[in-house]
Amino acid sequence: MNIAGREIGPNNPPFVIAEVSCNHGGSPKRAHKLLEAAKACGADAVKFQAVEPHKITIDSDRPEFTIADGPWKGQNLFKLYSKTKTPFAWFPELKQHAEHIGVTWFASVFDRTAVDLMVELDAPAIKIASFEIVDTPLIQYAAKTGKPLIISTGMASYAEVSAAIKAIGPYKFEEHALLHCVSGYPTPVDQANLLRLKYGIRHGFVDGISDHSVGPVVPIAAVACGAHIIEKHFALSYFPDTEDSAFSLDEIDFAHMVRHVKDTWAAMQPAPIDVEHSSRPLRRSLFAVADIPKGALFSEDNIRSIRPGHGVAPSALPQFVGQRTSRAIKRGEPLNFDMIYVSEAMIEAARK
């Protein structure tokens, strides 16, 4: 998979996406600051949500449109999305600013007009959020653009994931990625279910994680499980709280996460272990620990396994003990097999 010229896959460092969501707090200026801060923290891309309330729900006071549980319990959907929206009108300037500072951008889409907006602005990718994975007509419409698709799988059954993949069909099948996701806000660490992620990566149908836990531990562990895409909510520490800030990382924690996920990936790569070269001479080996006259017997009193490693291996100790020396040996000399006296009789016996 390739997004804005960046190859994404197990042979490349993790592709880290800073999810802005509603952390701009309704301020386009703050949205621009988030772009700048995410780049400074080492994010590979910044993702927004191309959403306006009337495109994702309707303005209704019926009880069905009131959130029954969770962090937004009691809130009306239309009013909540009115507070958290990222207006379409912002996106031309967000695109311009992202390109000016040199960071990749794209957005989650929630209806066809948002897909059209991504095409109009030539976004390098399109995201399908977990809540939209069941909207296969939307997925198909996005797939037809030919742009790389990233799809989160929170709440989805295997059948629903399969239906989403089928909706992509022939349009851009090789250019899609599935992100393991648990749609809890926040997600307790003990419910991150990384075994499911690991299973999906092993069988080739999951590529990364969209994480809603508090802190950087789960994304780091996900990379150790093989994830090569990391999506994490990002907020600015010096702005007031937003609806999503409780499960977002600020600049310091996000920068730490980026460094640790990339270090974790590097630690898992096959590589020659050059760093051990200077340590090898310090391993144990056999040394004389006392002066031994010529013709005297080697014993565990006058030879021992000690550091450094300039003599023969400690496993050779039984071959020395009880044998006579071929010459005088000084205390501190490393042992070698030439120090063992070999008689004509011993050579003849060896030949037989």
Image: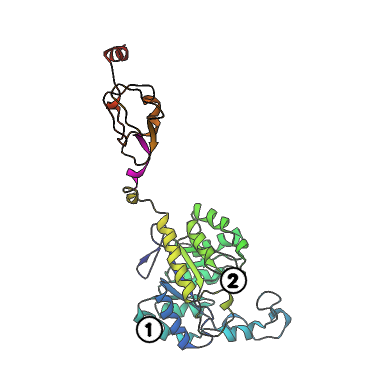
* Crowding near the residue tagged with mark 2, few <14, some 14–19, many ≥20 C-alpha atoms within 10 Å: some
Which range of residues does the magenta coloring cover? Answer: 279-288
Above or below, comparing residue 279 to residue 304 in the picture: below
Residue 313 sits in quarter: top left
Q: Is residue 153 left or right of residue 251?
A: right
Which residue was labeled with disc 2?
131
Residue 16 sits in quarter: bottom left
Q: Quadrant of the C terminus?
A: top left
Above or below, comparing residue 175 to residue 145 in the picture: above
Cα distance between the residues tagged 2 and 1? 29 Å
Say the numbered circle drawn on residue 96.
1
Q: Is residue 275 left or right of residue 106?
A: left
Say the numbered circle drawn on residue 70.
none
* Crowding near the residue tagged with mark 1, few <14, some 14–19, many ≥20 C-alpha atoms within 10 Å: few
From the top left corner, tell me how far across and down residue 207 is, in percent: 48, 60
Q: Amino acid at mark 1?
A: Gln
Q: Residue at x 38, y 22 (%)?
A: 322
Task: Identify the mark nearer the N-term, 2 or 1.
Answer: 1
From the top left corner, tell me how far across and down residue 266 is, in percent: 40, 58
Q: Is residue 286 magenta?
A: yes
Q: Is residue 11 left or right of residue 187?
A: left
From the top left corner, tell me how far across and down residue 234 is, in percent: 50, 76
For the residue pair 64 and 242, the one nearer the viewer reads as: 242
Q: Residue at x 53, y 72 (%)?
A: 138
**SS at mark 1?**
helix
Numbered disc in front, either 2 or 1: 1
Could you tell me if the residues under marks 2 and 1 are in contact, i.e. CB atoms within 8 Å? Answer: no
Q: Is residue 341 visible?
A: yes
Q: Which colour scheme appears in the figure?
A: rainbow
**SS at mark 2?**
helix
Q: Amino acid at mark 2?
A: Phe
